[in-house]
Image: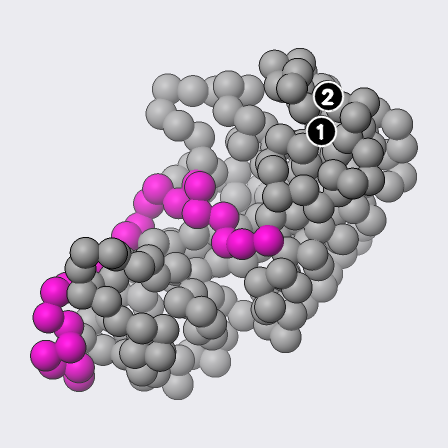
């Protein structure tokens, strides 16, 4: 299994060629990024000397402090066993795959509209509707908030939370603002949508900053307004 340092060495020709790419802690990503972190994450394979890269698009303003791989069901590349035997060839193959396939797969996902169009990166299990999947419901509701459609987001989340009654909306006070648990963040957002929609956009900006700071990627981030603020 290649270390992060070894992966960075293999990717160095691509990083030198593309100033819009960076590599930090086993993650190759497009920079500067705004509301979405997009790139490829290199997994650690416990019983193999290889590594697998999975392209992803992470909606930063969902408050999650690590890359969101839940929805990454599309492009994958496996660095083969024996990669260390010919570093030049391994580097060439890896850089070529990243530039031709992994990065283009997510490059256009810069906002909620493009995210929704990219079904392979939206996290919806086969055969289900958005309303059947809490993760997707949250993603859509956050997107609706980003374009100012608070009423639709409130209706969508309020309905979903009736099926998640172990996370009562009325109990989702400030202590759950940065909860690592998705359902509590859903409950917290629902509570604000029901009680004070003027706090929604500041919350999304705060969640985005919380996620970026948590991943220690602040210098690669460009804070920008949401679509409904421009």
Q: Is residue 10 left or right of residue 19?
A: left
Q: Residues within 10 Å of mark 2 (few under 14, many from 20)?
A: some
**Total labels drawn:** 2
- Of 176 and 157, the residue lying toward us: 176
Q: Is residue 6 left or right of residue 62?
A: left
- Find disc 1 in the rendering and name its residue: 187
- Find disc 2 in the rendering and name its residue: 168
Q: Is residue 114 left or right of residue 14?
A: right
User: Is 215 placed above or below 135 here?
Assistant: below
* Marks 2 and 1, how far apart at CA: 7 Å
Q: Is residue 76 magenta?
A: yes
Span shown in magenta? 65-88
Say which element carries label 1: helix
Q: At which x and y percent is residue 182? A: 60, 36
Residue lying at 52% horizontally and 38% vertically, measured from the top left: 116
Marked residue nearer the N-terminal end (2 or 1): 2
Look at the numbered discs 2 and 1 and tell me whether their residues touch, using CB distance below 8 Å. Answer: yes
Q: At which x and y percent is residue 97? A: 26, 65
Is residue 16 shown to the viewer in this render? yes
Quarter-of-image position of residue 141: top right
Q: Is residue 169 left or right of residue 220?
A: right
- Of 56 and 168, the residue lying toward us: 168
Residue lying at 59% horizontally and 69% vertically, measured from the top left: 217
User: Is 91 placed above or below 223 here?
Assistant: below
């Amino acid at each position: 299994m290649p270390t992060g340092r070894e992966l960075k060495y293999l990717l160095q020709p691509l990083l030198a060629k593309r100033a819009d790419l960076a590599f930090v802690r086993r993650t190759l990503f497009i920079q500067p990024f705004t509301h979405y972190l997009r790139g490829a994450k290199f997994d650690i394979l416990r019983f193999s000397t290889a590594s697998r890269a999975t392209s992803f698009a992470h909606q930063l303003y969902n408050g999650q402090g690590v890359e969101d791989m839940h929805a990454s069901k599309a492009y994958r590349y496996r660095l083969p066993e024996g990669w260390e035997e010919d570093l030049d060839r391994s580097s060439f193959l890896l850089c070529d795959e990243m530039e031709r396939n992994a990065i283009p797969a997510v490059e256009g996902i810069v906002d909620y509209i493009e995210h929704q169009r990219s079904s392979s990166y939206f996290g919806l299990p086969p055969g289900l509707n958005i309303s059947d999947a809490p993760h997707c419901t949250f993603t859509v509701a956050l997107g609706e908030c980003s374009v100012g459609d608070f009423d639709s987001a409130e209706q969508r989340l309020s309905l979903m939370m009736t099926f998640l009654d172990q996370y009562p909306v009325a109990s989702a006070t400030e202590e759950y603002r940065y909860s690592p648990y998705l359902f509590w963040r859903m409950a917290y957002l629902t509570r604000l949508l029901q009680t004070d929609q003027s706090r929604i956009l500041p919350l999304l900006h705060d969640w985005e900053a919380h996620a970026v700071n948590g991943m220690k990627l602040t210098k690669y981030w460009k804070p920008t307004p949401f679509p409904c603020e421009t």
